[in-house]
Image: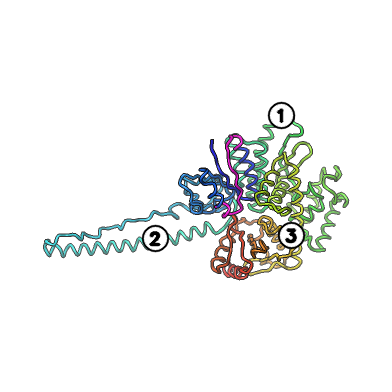
Amino acid sequence: FMCTDYHEELNHNSSIFLSLYQALFHCDQVQYTLVPVTGWQDLGTAFLEHKEQFRYFVLINCGANVDLLEMLQPDDDSIFFICDTHRPVDVVNVYNDTQIKLLIKQDDDLGVPTYDDIFRDEDDEEGGDSGNESDEGSEPSGKRRRFDEVTGLTLMIVFERRIERQRAKREWEARRREILFDYEQYEYHGTSAAMMFFELAWVLTKDTKDMLWWAVIGLTDQWVHDKITHMKYVTDIATMQRHVSRHNHRNEDEENSLSIDCMRISFEYDLRLTLYQHWSLYESICNSCYTSCHFKLWTLNGQKKLQEFLADMGLPLKQVRQKFNSMDMSIKENLREVIEESSNKYGMKDIRIQTFGVHFGFKNRFLASDMVHATAALLESTEKDESDSDNFIKALDSLSRSNLDRLHSGIDQAKKKLIAVQQTVASCICTNLILSQGPFLYCYLMEGTPDVKLFSKPMALTLLCKYLLKAFVHSTRNKRCKLLPLIMAAPKDVEKGTVIVVGIPPESETSDKKNFFGRAFEKAAESTSSRTLHDHFDTSIIELKTEDRSKFLDALITLLS
């Protein structure tokens, strides 16, 4: 029997990971307390409230990228198990093997500096004898003179050695600062926490098909929110495909005997059209980042191109504009091939992507990306004035196949969110709200902008930021601006006079997805005494006092130029 305490970041991958973790705990009848947290302050408060009750703490998607023991000041017998995708991992967490237990995939290259390069024991020895100062005064004068000469020589050697040690220490410290700067300057993401935990369950022979589906959703979340490279995504998809084949083969006979409760996961080479099976094909094309940016649908010429594209596919407009489920079966049967053929003609060579789908019973079919958008929308829902924790529980519920009503509600909210994102992108492009500030692009959403409340949430603003940068790169003729990163700000709390600020790296197909804005934000705030709150687990997302915005941006321009 073990009693453990969760600290869970309120993000999408965490809710998926938690479904896996709960399932495994239920297998072993382990009691636990779940505490969702939104940032470092929440985590500190939650730990203080629970540290007397528990010895073991499991941190999901938080805690790896700070010196956790320094921040929380726990008792010596507290043990932390951390499964966090945030990189780089703090070096103290890496080399502490008593209280910090990191769950990290072996082939994840952390690039951690060697121990001797960043840690060194203080040398308390003075390295020499300072001489005997309690000599008897009855010694002969000649002997005393020779002794003084030897003592003076010894002191000189000791002094030189001390200077040499101090010089070596300064050089080591300078080298250490350089090594740590290189290691810590970029923020990026490792293997999905949900995927990590599924593989742990597999090693323990406790993996289930539900766990496998949640792991697939966790990986897809990283792709949808642009957190990993395409190569990493394809590699991890291949890993998941092997597990899917194994489960399908293992349960083949069992599945044939099931009816309405059966669940089947399948590998798909499906369309990059968001939620198209739960929308109309036309609305999905208009509100998917990939097609919207390629056609430049915020322009009249783009709208014209879209009509030509639909005509090229030979699909009746009536069919394209109605719900996907209501389309003629004869059209749906080879729809993906028809769309791919026309997409190739219009330069969209990668309209299809490797992914997974699931069937619940006979009627309900979802792609992994459908689940990602639905749960993300529930997690940051602004439709009701509910707490972040309440939204988290709803997002968690939507992952259960016994709660499909919640999932469909999330899909409906996701559609509204995507429409808001595309309308805001079109507005920003058409009104030239994206400004070149030298080393980066900058866009500020004014108070009163439609859907501005939605974009006060970190995931929604980050998604908007990524879509907007893609759209800008497709629309601008300035070659230099195409290579710049983007900083976006939106009102956070009007009463407190704060804005939320997000920075993302340049848009590139070969991007390594590493983000340098976390460190830059810290240095700019420090140099200008700007009132900022660096509370988010993603360091590239901060809150800033509205009146400090100008001096903060000026400092960033100077720092990054």
Mark 1: amino acid: Asp
Residue 473 location, quadrant: bottom right
**Residue hosting label 3:** 451
User: Is residue 98 left or right of 234 when viewed as pictured?
Assistant: left
Mark 3: amino acid: Asp
> Closer to the observer: label 1 or label 3?
3
**Residue hosting label 2:** 169
Residue 7 seen in render: yes
The quadrant the N terminus occupies is top right
Q: Position of residue 320 (x, y in %)?
A: 85, 50
Q: Is residue 188 above or below residue 55?
A: below
Mark earlier in primary sequence (2, 3): 2
Q: Name the one closer to the observer, 496 or 323.
A: 496
Cα distance between the residues tagged 2 and 3:
55 Å
Q: Is residue 139 above or below residue 35?
A: below
The quadrant the C terminus occupies is bottom right
Residue sitting at x 58%, y 45%: 6
Helix, strand or loop under label 1? helix
Q: Position of residue 106 (x, y in %)?
A: 54, 44
Q: Name the one closer to the observer, 344 or 94.
A: 94
**Residue hosting label 1:** 253
Q: Name the one closer to the observer, 19 or 158.
A: 19
